[in-house]
Image (cartoon, coloured by chain):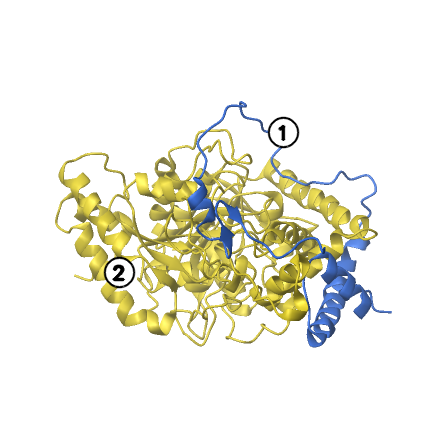
């Protein structure tokens, strides 16, 4: 049985906020199954007593002093905005009336 | 004199001696780029105005004998995922096709302070996801040795620019081999330093626990000089190493007598190209003849590295790329009447802004992180990552360095693997393990295949031991002629 159905692809695409065409859904299902099938290799290894590595350099939380420093000016932060008004990013309506 | 064909250290002598000006050199390079880049396609953006201004400033510094570094006045190409203030940073994607950086990456500031000259931004796989530079939204890049072949990836533009003498130096980024593999395929030197050695501030994030910036150069001495310029602690990158960088140049011109080099047997597998195997074996004999102690070693979890990487890297990428939502910068989809609302805008922006490979990795990463699959994939991969790291830790108890091929084959033909993602992923098999472990590694030229394509040798070092890698790489290079072979 395939690991990923068309329905799974639709669910994951929704989580990723990615709209897919019907052809893309089919292609993704096919390729994800092939790739995830290859990942099964990892199950050959017993890892029950192994700690996970999320980061190779041992580091605790890295803090800096809580002092305000200069940041990017508002007009530079807005220079790449697809849509803006005054000092704000403008987006489509969020809540339906 | 063909100035553009010289190395940075050769040119530095001419600049300091004021036999040549940086402005003259920079203009020569643009002349060469104009002639050749139509066929190669190494650059996405040329920054000629900035470069000429920087070159003039460098000439002034040299004239006044003020703040002269080893690379002052040397022209460099920058991979298009590093931010230069006021310049496009596209990341090879339609999503960032119009993005003008509002700030400089830390590496860019370091290069500026040292008086280097920015020629332009180089082509790359979209968001650095690829091994051939074919997933770029903008163009393909030809391998300068034979343009029917790929230059490697994802830093393919950077490697091709240096190999075709369209840049004296370049910088790239390496998440699973993206500096070393293109360096190998283009017959130049490429190094991924220890994770955290070079600041990632201002590098567009792909997989944050793996990404590392490094040099692509014509020879090992240039690599050492450029690494010295770009490395060092950066308080605005929280994963930056809190240690001072050694004087890398001091490791050059030393012999390698009694250095212990391990040859991991798992890197000489079925499916490795015969020319690659032969060249690498000869290179190992050369290292032995130079006095190194060579012995076989086992890294038993090597075969699990690709599967581990293609769970971890896409998982991190799916999180990092969530920011491209059409709100603050980058592409935003035009709204159709049926698609009003914020959610529709997000979904269409990602649909139209990302290419197929990026979407595939977002899907893969979102799936392996999703509820019910996290333990089976992501956590499992993190545990296997521990085993892969332990393999190296054990090997470095006994050895100073490890030697392997950089890639199992020379460059492949354009289009050969683009429709088969898994085959493409497997081409990174020898470079991925060091990213998972965070270790430094270099690729240097060690041969040419029967069909005339370069072959690379990889030297892997222990954490923070870039110096010893450079020492052995330089000793090998100085006793061979592979680095003098030119593509054009």
Where does the image place residue B324, in percent across and percent down from the top left?
58, 55
Chain A shade in the render: blue
Residue wearing tag 1: A61
Residue shown at 54%/58% (left/top)? B127
Where does the image place residue B289, in percent across and percent down from the top left?
43, 50
Compare residues A3 and B297 and report the one nearer the observer: A3
Q: Which mark is residue B5?
A: 2
B180 vs B425, left or right, is: left
Cα–Cα span, label 2 and label 1: 47 Å
Q: Which mark is residue B378?
A: none
The residue furthest front is A97
Q: Are marks 2 and 1 on the same chain?
A: no
As helix, strand or loop, the secondary structure at mark 1 comes to loop
Chain B shade in the render: yellow
Task: Give me the chain letter of mark 2.
Answer: B
As helix, strand or loop, the secondary structure at mark 2 comes to helix
A11 vs B399, left or right, is: right
């Amino acid at each position: 049985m395939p690991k990923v159905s068309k329905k799974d692809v639709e669910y994951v695409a929704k989580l990723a906020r990615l709209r897919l065409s019907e052809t893309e859904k089919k292609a993704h299902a096919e390729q994800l199954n092939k790739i995830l099938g290859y990942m099964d290799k990892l199950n050959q290894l017993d890892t029950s007593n192994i700690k996970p590595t999320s980061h190779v350099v041992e580091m605790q939380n890295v803090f800096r002093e809580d002092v305000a420093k200069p940041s990017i000016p508002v007009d530079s932060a807005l220079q790449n905005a697809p849509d803006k008004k005054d000092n704000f990013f403008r987006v489509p309506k969020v809540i339906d009336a | 004199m063909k100035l553009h064909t010289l190395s940075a250290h050769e040119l530095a002598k001419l600049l300091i001696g004021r036999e040549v000006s940086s402005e003259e050199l920079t203009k020569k390079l643009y002349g060469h780029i104009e002639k050749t880049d139509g066929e190669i396609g190494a650059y996405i953006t040329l920054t000629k105005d900035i470069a000429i201004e920087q070159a003039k400033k460098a000439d002034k510094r040299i004239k006044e004998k003020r703040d002269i570094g080893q690379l002052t006045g040397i022209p460099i190409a920058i991979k298009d995922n590093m931010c230069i203030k006021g310049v496009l940073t596209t990341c090879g994607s339609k999503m960032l096709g119009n993005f003008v950086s509002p700030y400089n990456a830390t590496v860019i500031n370091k290069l500026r302070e040292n008086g280097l000259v920015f020629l332009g931004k180089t082509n790359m796989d979209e968001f650095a996801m690829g091994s051939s530079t074919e997933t770029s939204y903008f163009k393909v890049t030809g391998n300068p040795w034979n343009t029917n072949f790929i230059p490697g990836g994802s830093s393919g533009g950077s490697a091709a620019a240096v190999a075709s003498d369209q840049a004296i130096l370049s910088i790239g980024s390496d998440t699973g081999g993206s500096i070393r593999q293109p360096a190998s395929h283009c017959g130049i030197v490429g190094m991924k330093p220890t994770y955290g050695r070079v600041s990632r501030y201002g590098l567009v994030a792909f997989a944050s626990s793996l990404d590392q910036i490094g040099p692509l150069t014509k020879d090992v001495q240039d690599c050492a000089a450029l690494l010295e310029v770009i490395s060092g602690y950066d308080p605005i990158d929280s994963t930056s190493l809190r240690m001072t960088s050694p004087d890398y140049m001091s490791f050059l011109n030393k012999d390698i007598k009694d250095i212990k080099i391990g040859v991991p047997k798992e890197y000489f597998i079925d499916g490795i190209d015969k020319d690659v195997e032969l060249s690498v074996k000869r290179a190992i004999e050369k290292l032995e003849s130079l006095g190194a102690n060579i012995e076989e070693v086992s890294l038993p979890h090597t075969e699990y590295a690709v599967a581990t990487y293609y769970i971890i890297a896409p998982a991190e990428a799916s999180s990092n790329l969530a920011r491209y939502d059409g709100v603050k910068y980058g592409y935003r989809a035009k709204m159709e009447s049926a698609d009003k609302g914020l959610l529709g805008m997000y979904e269409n922006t990602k649909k139209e802004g990302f290419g197929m490979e990026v979407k595939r990795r977002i899907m893969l990463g979102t799936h392996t992180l999703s509820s019910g699959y996290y333990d089976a994939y992501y956590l499992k991969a993190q545990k296997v990552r521990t085993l892969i790291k332990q393999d190296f830790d054990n090997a470095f108890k006994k050895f100073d360095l490890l030697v392997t091929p950089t890639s199992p084959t020379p460059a492949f033909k354009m289009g050969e693997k683009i429709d088969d993602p898994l085959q493409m992923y497997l081409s990174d098999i020898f470079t991925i393990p060091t990213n998972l472990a965070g270790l430094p590694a270099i690729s240097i030229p060690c041969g040419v295949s029967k069909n005339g394509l370069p072959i690379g040798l990889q030297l892997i070092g222990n954490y923070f031991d870039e110096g010893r890698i450079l020492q052995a790489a330089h000793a090998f290079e100085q006793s061979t002629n592979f680095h003098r072979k030119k593509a054009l």
